[in-house]
Amino acid sequence: MPRAKFQTLTEQMFYILLCLKEECYGMDILDRVPAMTENRVSVGSGTLYNLLEQFLNEGFIRETKVEGRRRSYILTEKGREILKKEYDRICAQAVDYRRIFGEEEGQ
């Protein structure tokens, strides 16, 4: 059975939504994702704008300003919920890892 769209998020999806906790332009996101992940994750402009369009269609984000070709976005409540759900999923994976390898929380 195929995975439902946005049931889980890719790293790029997660960090794009995380950036949008505060209003910002697409170009800001291209700079912020590598900065917040110490260059572990990057997003190409094609991927970014494709995902922004999908997030808009799903109601995860909303446009806040349009200045010519520059558009700014911010996370909606629905977007916060999907981001929190993904965070909880990642945390559960970390707990499973610690349990399997016998590590205590916080080590």
Image: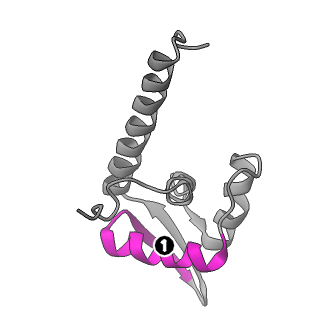
Quadrant location of residue 12?
Answer: bottom right
User: In the image, what residue occupies the spot 50% across and 68% down?
Assistant: 73
- Please give the name of the residue rendered at 57% of the width and 72% of the height, measured from the top-left corner: 48
Query: What residue span does the magenta drawing correspond to?
Result: 44-66
Q: Residue 61, how many percent across, how many down?
A: 41, 65
Q: Is residue 102 above or below residue 97?
A: above
Inspect the image, locate mark 1, and give the three-letter code of the amino acid beneath it.
Leu
Q: What main secondary structure does the magenta stretch of the protein show?
A: helix
**Quadrant of the image occupied by residue 23:** bottom right
Q: State the SS at label 1.
A: helix
Q: Nearer the viewer, residue 103 or 74?
A: 103
* Residue 105 x/y as whole percent: 51, 13
Q: Is residue 57 magenta?
A: yes
Residue for point 40% across, 69% down: 55
Residue at image mark 1: 52
Q: Is residue 57 above or below residue 89?
A: below
Its colouring scheme is: one colour
Answer left or right for 41 relative to 17: right
Q: Nearer the viewer, residue 59 or 54?
A: 54
| 10 Å crowding of disc 1: few (<14), some (14-19), many (20+) | many
| 76 relative to 102, above or below | below
Relative image position of residue 8 (x, y in whole percent) = 38, 53
Indicate left or right for 31 with 21 as reference. right
Along the horizontal axis of the image, is 18 left or right of 43?
left
